[in-house]
Image (cartoon, rainbow, N blue to C red):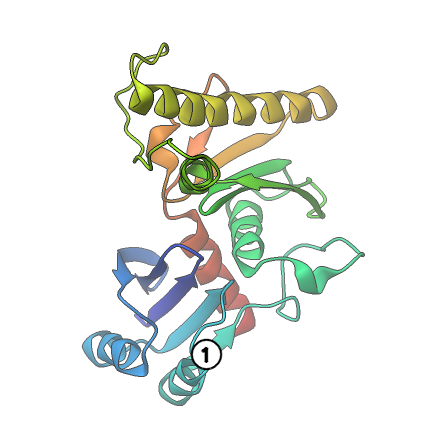
């Protein structure tokens, strides 16, 4: 079976995943986007196909490398998509959001789907049962909120997220953790409730690097899938190659 290389370049991490046929094999973080880094992956795994989702100004030379060694596709608003996009400015939609919506449509076709991506920002992405991506919303992500309180105050420290924190913080660190993590959980539940008021039956998908902090805290029923963006990229690679 052919191997497919899926690359996801986000604001926080550069990641890749490998599929053998349609089976997810592995995921890893890249140290950088140098051509030598990508060439090592190509030499080690010999993928036949590759696809890149990027929301950053990445090293453009890697696109030529991937195109010379594989059947390559760069995800954009010009890609063949299994859904329609808002008529306003489709070119402004992040490639990561396109991949997440593609995964929802691929695995849950003809259903309403709300996909929540937890990366540098939280993205809420709604696609209806007619496969119309209606848009959604964007708000600051976990690390961004911690950094903002540190950078825009004189004395609040920069701390890291933890799954073990109290409702009532007993020091600065736990006050910040409770405020940010519980605040985000309540935000997500509140937005899900707003969608539920309008759409009586829909699936909620939670994905992204910070997913583990929120799965136990959400009261709404969700599908938690850390590899959802890569599954969407694989499906789009099949469509576009």
Q: In the image, what residue occupies the spot 44% across and 81% down? A: 63
Establish if 209 lies above or below 179: below
Please state, as top left, top right, bottom left or bottom right, where the N terminus lies in the image: bottom left
Question: Residue 211 appears at what percent x and percent y?
Answer: 38, 36
Establish if 189 lies above or below 100: above
Q: Quadrant of residue 4?
A: bottom left
User: Residue 150 vs residue 100: left or right?
Assistant: left
Establish if 73 lies above or below 77: below
User: Residue 204 vs residue 210: left or right?
Assistant: right
Q: Quadrant of residue 25?
A: bottom left
Question: Residue 27 appears at what percent x and percent y?
Answer: 28, 56
Establish if 171 lies above or below 118: above
Report the label total. Answer: 1
Residue with the mark numbered 1: 72
Q: In the image, what residue occupies the spot 41% across and 41% down? A: 147
Q: In the image, what residue occupies the spot 52% across and 73% down? A: 74
Residue 48 appears anywhere in the view: yes
Question: Residue 40 appears at what percent x and percent y?
Answer: 22, 78
Badge 1: residue crowd in 10 Å (few <14, some 14–19, many ≥20) = many
Residue furthest out toward the right: 87
């Amino acid at each position: 079976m052919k191997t497919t290389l899926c690359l996801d370049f986000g604001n926080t991490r550069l990641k890749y995943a490998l599929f053998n046929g349609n089976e997810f094999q592995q995921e890893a973080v890249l140290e950088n986007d140098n051509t030598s880094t990508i060439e090592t992956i190509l030499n080690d795994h010999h993928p036949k196909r590759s696809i890149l989702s990027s929301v950053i100004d990445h090293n453009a030379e890697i696109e030529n490398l991937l195109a010379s060694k594989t059947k390559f596709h760069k995800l954009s608003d010009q890609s063949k998509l299994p859904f329609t996009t808002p008529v306003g400015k489709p070119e402004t939609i992040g490639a990561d959001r396109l991949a997440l919506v593609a995964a929802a449509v691929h695995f849950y076709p003809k259903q309403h789907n709300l996909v929540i991506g937890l990366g540098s920002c939280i993205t809420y992405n709604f696609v209806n049962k007619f496969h119309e991506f209606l848009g959604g919303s964007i708000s600051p992500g976990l690390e961004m909120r911690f950094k903002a309180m540190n950078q825009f105050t004189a004395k609040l420290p920069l701390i890291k997220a933890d799954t073990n924190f109290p409702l009532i913080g007993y020091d600065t660190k736990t006050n910040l953790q409770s405020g940010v993590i519980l605040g985000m959980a309540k935000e997500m539940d509140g937005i899900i409730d707003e969608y539920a008021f309008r759409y009586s039956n829909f699936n909620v998908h939670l994905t992204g690097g910070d997913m583990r902090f929120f799965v136990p805290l959400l009261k709404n029923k969700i599908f938690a899938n850390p590899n959802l963006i890569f599954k969407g990229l694989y499906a789009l690679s099949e469509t576009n190659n």
